[in-house]
Image (cartoon, coloured by chain):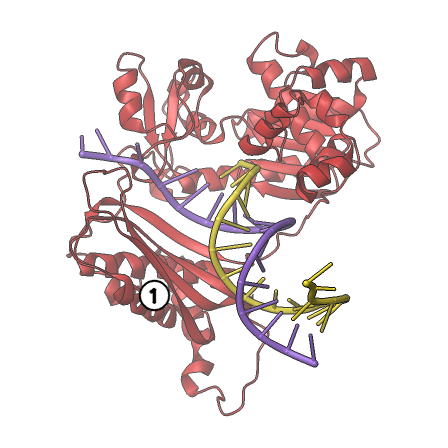
Chain colours: A red, B purple, C yellow
DNA sequence: TCTGGGGTCCTAGGACCC
DNA sequence: TCTGGGGTCCTAGGACCC
């Protein structure tokens, strides 16, 4: 039995937690570069603003709706997320933090009224963090997800589901006739694992609602679709196929990619950006105690600018030996960049991905390639670099090819509407006035 | 003028092996 | 007429998630 705790419109709720004036208003949080909406308040959703809707279109389409747009403040969201998960963890003995705003909590052996307990935890998160949540409880993770959807819809859209399922919904506690009614009222596309493609195919096959989906034969589903879809169907039927993973597995690839604040035409601008991305990616790599065997670098123009000549290219640069040394990773990324760069284009985006990751504690011995002095000193050097940057702030110590303060870094992302780092920066602490 | 970022898993097909 | 059987590894592409 699982309980899924999921923050409502999470990024918007984080912003509202510190700015109550945003309550009851259409609010969107924008992606990097203030590009498009990645979180919307209920009021914004009601206007018809879609996920991924470009901000300049929103502005044009709803000039008088008073839509408030904020730049993404991931530092704030990450911190509030940690606090929310810590409270949700009180639901049961094991927790899987599934995303920034969701956690699965194992409640299988809790001898209590799960719905009451769910409401208690929900209230606590609301009071202590200021984030409204939905709690969904079910026999499998897929059912807990579905229950969460019901809990939120019943709260937000009166009439969609019975009112007593709002905010906290335990599907496994429903009498079977009530459960069937709920499942029949839910579109297949709401199921975790049924994306747009599969949902359309299911609809073509006459499976429009979740009740019908739960009645499919798993073996047939596997033949017609795949083992993935089969697992989802089994989970809907109450057979647990997706276990809880309380310990986060280390990443198999690590990426840092960004759209630029303004188009970049000069090679040197790309060098700065790629250096920065390789640096960030290397920091993440060391944080999970891995090394990379390969570095992938890519650049491309904007596919939205039809009037521009288009160019998109990427390349994989293998490392001589797996490394977590920022200098080596930057050097490889820049070698790749030199190979793919072509002058005469307006580049809109670049990225660095670290591939072929392995545990840094595993050493593959090699004949004739014993570690040099530099190799042995790398961990200490990198640990010092990380310690200084953690102590004095990101980028306090950096590689010169990232560009100096005085150089123009036109590729840097635009964030014109960002709120302060209220909870992680002493200087940004909100002040209470009497 | 203006359009995000970061991941995972599965499958089919090709190359290659004996 | 008629051309084996069994296996691994890698990659690209598709689909999904938040």
Give percent across and percent down for residue C4.
Answer: 74, 67
Residue situated furthest bottom in the rendering: A368
* Residue A270 visible in rendering: yes
- How many numbered tags mark residues here? 1
Q: Name the residue under label 1.
A: A333
Q: Observer-nearest residue: A57 or A70?
A: A57
Vertical side of A38 occupied by A82: above or below? below
Give percent across and percent down for residue A92.
Answer: 74, 38
Residue situated furthest top in the rendering: A159
Q: Observer-nearest residue: A266 or A128?
A: A266
Give percent across and percent down for residue A38.
Answer: 41, 32
Residue pictured at 19% horizontal, 48% vertical: A346
Q: In which quarter of the image is residue B3?
A: top left
Q: In which quarter of the image is the N terminus of chain A?
A: top right
Q: In this view, does A324 lie to the left or right of A250?
A: left
Q: Observer-nearest residue: A247 or A53?
A: A53
- Tag 1: Cα neighbours inside 10 Å, few (<14), some, or many (≥20)? many
Vertical side of A68 occupied by A421: above or below? below
* Marked residue chain, label 1: A
* Residue A175 visible in rendering: no
Q: In which quarter of the image is residue A308?
A: top left
Q: Is residue A118 left or right of residue A288?
A: right
Vertical side of A159 occupied by A135: above or below? below
Q: Quadrant of the C terminus of chain A?
A: top left
Residue pictured at 75% horizontal, 23% vertical: A171
Give percent across and percent down for residue A373.
Answer: 42, 87
Q: SS class of the residue under badge 1? A: helix
Q: Quadrant of residue A136?
A: top right
Residue pictured at 44% horizontal, 18% vertical: A45
């Amino acid at each position: 039995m699982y309980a899924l705790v999921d923050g409502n419109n999470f990024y918007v709720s984080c912003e509202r937690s510190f700015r109550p004036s945003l309550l009851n208003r259409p609010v969107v949080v924008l992606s990097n570069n203030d590009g498009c909406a990645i979180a919307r308040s209920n009021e914004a959703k009601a206007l018809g603003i879609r996920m991924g809707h470009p901000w300049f279109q929103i502005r044009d389409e709803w000039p008088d709706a008073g839509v408030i747009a904020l730049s993404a403040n991931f530092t704030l969201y990450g911190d509030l997320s940690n606090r929310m998960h810590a409270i949700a963890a009180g639901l049961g003995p094991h927790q899987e933090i599934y995303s920034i705003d969701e956690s699965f909590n194992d409640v299988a052996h809790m001898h209590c009224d799960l719905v009451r307990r769910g409401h208690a935890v929900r209230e606590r998160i609301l009071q202590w963090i200021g984030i409204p949540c939905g709690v969904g409880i079910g026999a499998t993770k897929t059912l807990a997800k579905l229950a969460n959807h019901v809990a939120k819809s019943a709260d937000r859209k009166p009439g969609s589901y019975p009112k007593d399922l709002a905010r906290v919904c335990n599907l496994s506690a429903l009498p079977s006739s009530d459960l069937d009614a709920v499942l029949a009222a839910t579109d297949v596309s709401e199921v975790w694992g049924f994306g747009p493609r599969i949902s359309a195919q299911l609809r073509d096959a006459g499976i429009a609602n979740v009740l019908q989906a739960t009645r499919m034969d798993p073996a047939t589903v596997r033949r017609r679709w795949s083992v993935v879809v089969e697992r989802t169907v089994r989970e809907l039927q109450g057979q647990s196929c997706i276990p809880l993973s309380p310990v986060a597995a280390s990443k198999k690839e690590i990426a840092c990619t960004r759209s630029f604040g303004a188009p970049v035409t000069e090679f040197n601008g790309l060098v700065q950006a790629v250096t920065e991305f390789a640096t960030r990616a290397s920091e993440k790599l060391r944080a999970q105690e891995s090394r990379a065997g390969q570095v992938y670098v890519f650049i491309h123009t904007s596919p939205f600018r039809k009037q521009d000549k288009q160019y998109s290219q990427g390349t994989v640069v293998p490392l001589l030996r797996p490394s977590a040394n920022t200098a080596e990773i930057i050097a490889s990324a820049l070698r790749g960049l030199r190979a793919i760069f072509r002058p005469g284009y307006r580049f809109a985006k670049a990225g660095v991905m670290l591939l072929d990751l392995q545990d840094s504690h595993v050493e593959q011995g090699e004949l004739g390639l014993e570690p040099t002095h530099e190799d042995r000193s790398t961990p200490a050097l990198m640990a010092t670099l990380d310690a200084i940057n953690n102590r004095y702030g990101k980028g306090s110590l950096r590689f010169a090819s990232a560009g100096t303060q005085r150089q123009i870094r036109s590729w840097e992302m635009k964030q014109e509407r960002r709120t302060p780092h209220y909870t992680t920066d002493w200087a940004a602490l909100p002040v209470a006035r009497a």
